[in-house]
Image (spheres, rainbow, N blue to C red):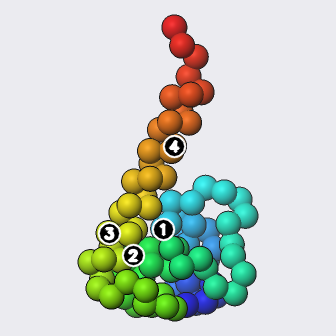
Amino acid sequence: MKTKEAIQYFGSPENLKAALHLRARKTFWGEHPPLERQYQIEVITNGALKADRPVLQSLSERRALVCQTYLGAERRRAQRTNQERPSA
């Protein structure tokens, strides 16, 4: 999939970032999103947009990758939040 296709599907870069739960100001990739994001977009769009290289065979395997990625990001976010809190 191309970045332009994903933006077109969601209507704007801001809508795409919101769907992917991205907060960074500049998150847009070159011509193609990273494969990890392509799989995430494929799951979110229920297959309307397809990842370029089908490394994983089934949709359930792709969903598992997205869940692992999301949970890993949540853990890192929680760790950063805990580190920023002043200890009593």
Query: Above or below — where is 34 with respect to 74?
Result: below
Q: Which of marks 2 and 1 is nearer the N terminus?
A: 1
Tag 4 secondary structure: helix
Q: Earlier in the sequence, mark 4 or mark 3?
A: 3
**Within-10-Å neighbours for mark 1: few <14, some 14–19, many 20+:** some
Query: Above or below — where is 58 with respect to 25?
Result: below
Q: Image quadrant of residue 40?
A: bottom left
Query: In the displayed structure, does residue 87 sit left or right of residue 4?
Result: left
**Within-10-Å neighbours for mark 3: few <14, some 14–19, many 20+:** few
Q: Which of marks 4 and 2 is in front?
A: 4
Disc 2 marks a residue whose amino acid type is: Ile
The residue drawn where x is 67% and y is 66% is 27
Q: Which of marks 4 and 3 is in front?
A: 3
Q: Image quadrant of residue 75?
A: top left
Q: Mark 4 points at which residue?
A: 77
Instruction: Calculate the distance from the C-alpha at mark 1 to the C-alpha at mark 4.
Output: 18 Å
Q: Name the residue under label 2.
A: 44
Disc 3 marks a residue whose amino acid type is: Ala
Instruction: Calculate the distance from the C-alpha at mark 1 to the C-alpha at mark 3.
Output: 18 Å
The residue drawn where x is 50% and y is 66% is 20
Whether tag 2 and tag 1 are in contact, CB under 8 A, the answer is: yes
Q: Name the residue under label 1.
A: 19
Whether tag 4 and tag 2 are in contact, CB under 8 A, the answer is: no
| Residue 27 visible somewhere in the drawing | yes
Whether tag 4 and tag 3 are in contact, CB under 8 A, the answer is: no
Q: Earlier in the sequence, mark 1 or mark 3?
A: 1
Q: Earlier in the sequence, mark 4 or mark 2?
A: 2
Q: Which of marks 3 and 2 is nearer the N terminus?
A: 2
